[in-house]
């Protein structure tokens, strides 16, 4: 495994980027990987980069599922990726919603994307250089949280990506570094970008 990229993080949204977007994914048997995701994450693993999921999960605040059920969902996600030879280094989630749901989850927080709390925590715990890192997601909020701390943003057209690409104006904070069809192409772009820098 190549260690020269060991302090680079690739922060991945979950729903619509890794898993098929179905609304509130609330059961392990609903987890379906988007085609090519395992191969894409495996390529990052081979380069020694840290693959980190950062995901808003306000379904917890809204009472659709518990943190225990979310842990089961993530175990299934890890199992499916492992079957493709791919590994996630960590999964960070925000269970909050600022205005909807139940205590103690219904409250403003610093971890709900586009806030950067999850990425900052991951960078601290995993020793990542955010200025050399990347955020990949199907929503502009996924990219905005990374751009706020200096990471480059890649918008994928899976999930809500097509709608988000059409909605993207000239807001530099939300504008992606590139737009690609899926995670596999995002990883190819990241690897080429690393060659250029």
Image (tube, helix red, strand yellow):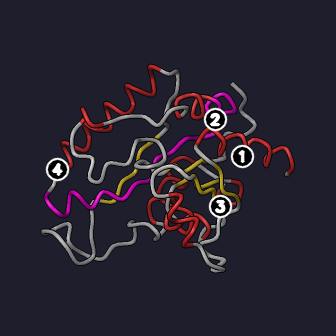
Whichever of labels 4 and 3 marks the residue nearer the N terminus, that label is 4
> How far across and how far down the image is residue 69, in percent?
19, 42
**Crowd around label 2: few <14 · some 14–19 · many ≥20 (10 Å):** many
Q: Which numbered disc, 1 or 4, marks the residue closer to the eye?
A: 1
Give whichever of discs 1 and 4 has the lower sequence position: 4
Q: Earlier in the sequence, mark 2 or mark 3?
A: 2
Q: Is residue 152 above or below residue 13?
A: below
Q: Earlier in the sequence, mark 3 or mark 1?
A: 3
54 or 185, nearer to the observer = 185
Mark toward the start of the polypeptide (1 vs 2) = 2
Spatial CA span between label 1 and label 4: 35 Å
Verify CB contact (< 8 Å) between mark 4 and mark 2.
Answer: no
Within-10-Å neighbours for mark 1: few <14, some 14–19, many 20+:
many
> Is 89 above or below relative to 81?
below
Is there a contact, CB below 8 Å, between mark 1 and mark 2? yes
Is 50 situated left or right of 102 in this image?
right
Q: Give me the disc on residue 66.
A: 4
- In the rendered image, residue 6, in percent from the top left (x then y), is placed at 67, 39
Q: How much space separates mark 1 and mark 2, taking CA atoms?
A: 9 Å
Q: Disc 1 marks which residue?
A: 190
Residue 50, position as x, y percentages in the image: 58, 41
Q: Residues within 10 Å of mark 3 (few under 14, many from 20)?
A: many
Location of residue 184 in the rendering, given as x and y in whole percent from the top left corner: 62, 38
Q: Residue at x 51, y 49 (%)?
A: 158
The part of the chain drawn in magenta is 43-63
> What residue sits right under mark 3 in the picture?
151
Q: Are marks 3 and 1 in contact (CB under 8 Å)?
A: no
Q: CA distance from mark 4 to mark 2?
A: 31 Å
Dot 2 corresponds to which residue? Answer: 44
Residue drawn at the location 66% of the way across and 77% of the way down: 172
Tell me the distance, in whole angstroms, between the alpha carbons under discs 4 and 3.
Answer: 31 Å
Secondary structure at numbered mark 2: helix
């Amino acid at each position: 495994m190549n260690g020269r990229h060991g302090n680079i993080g690739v922060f991945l949204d979950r729903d619509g980027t890794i898993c098929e977007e179905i609304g509130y994914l609330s059961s392990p048997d609903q987890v379906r990987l988007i085609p090519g995701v395992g191969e894409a994450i495996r390529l990052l693993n081979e380069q020694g980069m840290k693959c980190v999921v950062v995901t808003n999960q306000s379904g917890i605040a809204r009472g659709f599922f518990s943190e225990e059920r979310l842990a089961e969902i993530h175990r299934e996600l890890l199992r499916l990726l492992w079957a493709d030879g791919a590994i996630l280094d960590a999964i960070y989630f925000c269970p909050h919603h600022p205005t909807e749901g139940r205590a103690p989850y219904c409250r403003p927080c610093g971890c709900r994307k586009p806030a950067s709390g999850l990425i900052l925590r991951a960078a601290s715990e995993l020793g990542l250089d955010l200025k050399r890192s990347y955020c990949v997601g199907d929503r502009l909020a996924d990219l905005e949280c990374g751009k706020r701390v200096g990471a480059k943003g890649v918008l994928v057209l899976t999930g809500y990506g097509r709608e988000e690409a059409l909605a993207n104006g000239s807001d530099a904070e939300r504008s992606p570094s590139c737009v690609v069809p899926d995670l596999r192409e995002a990883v190819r772009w990241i690897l080429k970008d690393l060659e250029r820098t």
